[in-house]
Image (cartoon, rainbow, N blue to C red):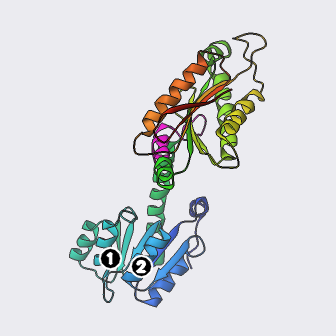
Amino acid sequence: MPQFNMEERRRANEQRYTILCIDDESVNLKVLASIFKDHYNVVACKSAKQGFQHALQENPDIILLDILMPEEDGFELMIKLKLHPKLTNIPVIFITGLQDVKNEEKGLKLGACDYIQKPFNSSIVRARVNTHLEIIRQRNLLKKFALFDSLTELPNRRKWLQDSTESWLLAKQAQSTMVYGIIDVDHFKKYNDHYGHHQGDLVLRKIANTIKRQLYDYHGAIFRCGGEEFYFYFPVSKSFTASTVLSACLNSITELAIPHHAVNNTYHVSVSIGAVQLIPNKNISIEQVIQQADERLYSVKNDSRNAFSLLELDLNNQKIPLDVS
């Protein structure tokens, strides 16, 4: 069996990719499995019907698909794959005994990323599959960079828009109580001016990681959505209150005891928080909730700082002040 080189092993170890092989000939499935099984998850099936079900269940990274199969051929399955929203972006390589140009053209026009003729060379199949998996790896990295802040490694505003919308819809369906809010670092411009932007960046990282750990304990998430501004959400349960979580976030930053002599010789870096607790519903949007959280934040910023302001919206979305700490 051909050996994987060091670069190919590196790629394989970064993520255990899944390869779905669909061919009605057992000998072809065995050969394909022997090429990839030591470095990838290989799922094999002998019909288009089984292949479609496995694609839904396994969500493979790439599909190796024969064309000539009984009942339903590879072209027909390819059309079904491309029409299904969950499967449409999975790359498909046809591996087939059909060697004429018209079939190859048809397969590529249907959306296949490659077309390999039988009898195939194992090294060629391995090389082509690895090439497409490398494209997938790079695409996933680009997607990650697009959704995460490079400084703090927190998810960014774009990721916030995705995740907060999803959490809102799930909570609305389940009638679950959620808290959405904004965290802002107090006197951060003064800190940057006094200590320099490099030191300011280090402080942002510390704050981000500290609050991330706190919210993680309560199944929450935090996102960097501006220079020193962070958005967050978390569910409320019977085992803890929203005030408990927000107090934990404030205290965790206080415990860092980062000097901030640009304010005075005894001042330390702190944060202010504005938050809203509610059951998501059709009569209000998450944008409106964040606007109200922003109003609560700036009431804190204009008062004492190093505190939170939390309000509850009842089922009629009327404000019920809960706590200021």
Task: List the residue tagged with mark 1.
Answer: 77
Above or below: residue 89 compared with residue 120: above
Q: Amino acid at mark 1?
A: Leu
Give residue 169's position: percent from left, percent from top. 45, 50
For residue 160: magenta?
Answer: yes
At 48% from the left and 45% from the top, the residue drawn is 280
Frontmost residue, 234 versus 205:
234
Q: Nearer the viewer, residue 314 or 125?
A: 314
User: Looking at this view, is 223 or 96 the one in front?
Assistant: 223
Q: Is residue 239 left or right of residue 63?
A: right
**Rendered-image quadrant of the C terminus:** top right
Residues at discs 1 and 2 in contact (Cβ within 8 Å): yes
Residue 178, percent across and down?
A: 56, 44
Q: Earlier in the sequence, mark 1 or mark 2?
A: 2
The single residue placed furthest to the left in the displayed view is: 102
Residue bearing mark 2: 51
What residue range appears in magenta?
149-165
What type is the residue that disc 2 sits on? Gly
Q: Is residue 200 left or right of residue 160?
A: right
Res. 142 in view: no
201 versus 194 height, above or below:
below
- Cα–Cα span, label 1 and label 2: 8 Å
Which residue is found at the position 47% from the left and 84% from the top? 29
Task: Look at 54% across and 37% down and name the residue there.
Answer: 149
> In terms of image quadrants, where is residue 120?
bottom left
Query: How many residues crowd around disc 1 within 10 Å: few (fewer than 14), some, or many (20 or more)?
Result: some
